[in-house]
Amino acid sequence: MKLASYKDGSRDGQLVVVSRDLRTAHYASGIAHRLQQALDDWDFYAPQLQDLYDALNADRARHSFDFNPAQCMAPLPRAYQWLSGAAYMSHLALLRQVAEGDLPAALKTDPLLHQGAGDAFIGPCDDIVVASEAMGIDFSAELAAITGDVKQDTSPEDALDAVRLLMLANPVSLRQLEAAEQGKGAGLVQSRPVTAFSPVAITPDELGEAWRGGKVHLALQTSWNGRKVGMCDAGPEMGFHFGQLIAHAAKTRHLRAGTVLGSGTVSNRGAEKHGRMDWPKGYGCIAEKRSMEALQNSKAKTGFMQFGDTVRMEMKGKDGHSLFGAIDQNVAPLYPVQAEAEPAQESAA
Amino acid sequence: MKLASYKDGSRDGQLVVVSRDLRTAHYASGIAHRLQQALDDWDFYAPQLQDLYDALNADRARHSFDFNPAQCMAPLPRAYQWLSGAAYMSHLALLRQVAEGDLPAALKTDPLLHQGAGDAFIGPCDDIVVASEAMGIDFSAELAAITGDVKQDTSPEDALDAVRLLMLANPVSLRQLEAAEQGKGAGLVQSRPVTAFSPVAITPDELGEAWRGGKVHLALQTSWNGRKVGMCDAGPEMGFHFGQLIAHAAKTRHLRAGTVLGSGTVSNRGAEKHGRMDWPKGYGCIAEKRSMEALQNSKAKTGFMQFGDTVRMEMKGKDGHSLFGAIDQNVAPLYPVQAEAEPAQESAA
């Protein structure tokens, strides 16, 4: 089934069930008001939500309305845990500007995860609000899983059973603030300001056989200012599947329902072509593109996002239909952008 | 006022108002059921909770009962953001085994914060459950603030106004897992498993003049296995006050109500005495003690916590009364500890 949270002025929004084709929706208020409520007692609520979903798809739901992604908050508007992974080795290698074979061995056996802030996720069409373009505004095309409760020290296989819902995610980075934070060695706070999610979260069964081995075997399409820049396959090159990422996070503690776990930038390997490295699937974040340029021409030339820029992410099934709806955002300034000041005219006294 | 969350089998517990002397309590269910609910709309709920608190202190509350800290969850049992600071320079210097003057200059002007997991806080008397003693189990005696909403790019002074409640905190560390995580450069996940909080959270006005300049000017007492090991003043040596920590976290994004922010281990400077460094106020975590030993005798000799160990933290006002109640925890094994296997006796056939 497919679930969304509609804006209603509250912090958690109203839970809605959305039809498979993303055309219609129905308030779930007769069942549960908030997604966290459903996650807290999933075995009780999920079958009821599924019944409403089935009725909606069969055009039997009594009070359905046209679904509007612009009305969506993040499916889970705030989460008690947001863990951001980096499961694609190609992304790790690119950001270090090394060949994948030259990555530290530990990164291939031990997933890289960092804790992020779950208090203020943003919706799929909400602005990315930044104080200054000089901060190096970057997007990141990712998948994310929402889990149920996970036992401490569980196996990757059991952890995989805890995946309740999947979404697309766009964790925004402020690349120019990263070096100072990395130098302090305490992880990233200011350089990871907000994360946006797709209009709907979907249960893994919606993916059919594209969901296997804890990975989503489909391409994630990214456009920047209307130009397609990435069409990366999220499946085979994911170095750790979602069960492995969840089990890593649960190694020393249990995780509670509503934990959101990001895959890291979906990224595909480059290949040498006529003696030159090439990345035919494109990129999922600007930092990758800049690394590609540096590796190709020893100089990054693409700049980061500017105010007014747009970014769009979408994943389609084998039938060509959008699975999660699209993340479609603008970059907006926190403060009014001042026009260049004109020299003051002296008054003719 | 003083607030707690009583265990009731639910994930968020029942909000209770606790008397100033921590002797009696009263369910707040007529006002709000959960602390997050009160934080989401503080201006509406706080005056009503304050009225109940005043009635309770005046022995006018109709259904009060004896307050029992063992019945407490963390005051906020799960939080949408848990940010852990490191605001005491003495702690930073000790853990690096350097003099405070030799700390990188940036650490003195730029607060060190890392994101933690807020999905599963534990209560003041809950066990610290760890799979293996070899993980290097350590406590940390800290203060923590719960905030209201904070605007993006706010000033430290305005940020200070967002402090709603204060608590004691014990973020548990698994010291032997830190090096591997630090090596990966993505912050700490497995080595920061759980955080416990004091039985009650209190509004800053409860501290009287001990709350000034965004700091708590009182001593935090720590006992390990019944022996007092720390009596550190939380005030003057806090390098960044809570407003500065909150403003740092809000530099690039707004924070939402219910964000919990930890001070880092409360730690006081050592002094040279008869040609030897000495730390008369003791320590707030075992890692500090081991560094003190290494600096004094070039070898750490104190081991980390074992199963069955206890740790207790408490802060008293000028009148000698406990302000937050005590954190009082045992370390317990995740799996049954096997007795040493006796050699199997051969059966006399």
Image (cartoon, coloured by chain):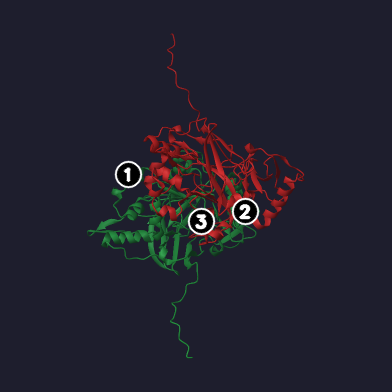
Chain colours: A green, B red
Q: Chain of mark 2?
A: B
* Left or right: where A178 falls relative to B77: left
Q: Residues within 10 Å of mark 1 (few under 14, many from 20)?
A: few
Q: Label 1 lies in what chain?
A: A
> Residue beneath label 2, please?
B39
Residue marked by disc 3: B244
Density class for disc 3 (Cα within 10 Å; few <14, some 14-19, many ≥20) is many
* Crowding at mark 2 (Cα within 10 Å: few <14, some 14-19, many 20+): many
Disc 2 and disc 1 in contact, CB within 8 angstroms: no
User: Dot 2: what SS?
Assistant: helix
Q: Please, what is the three-letter code of the amino acid marked with disc 3? A: Gln
The residue singled out by tag 1 in the image is A105
The span from disc 2 to disc 1 (Cα, nearest Å) is 45 Å
Could you tell me which secondary element the residue under label 1 belongs to?
loop
Q: Nearer the viewer, mark 1 or mark 3?
A: 3
Query: What residue is shown at x 53% (from left), y 53% (from top)?
Result: B242
Q: Going by the image, does A9 lie left or right of A266?
A: right
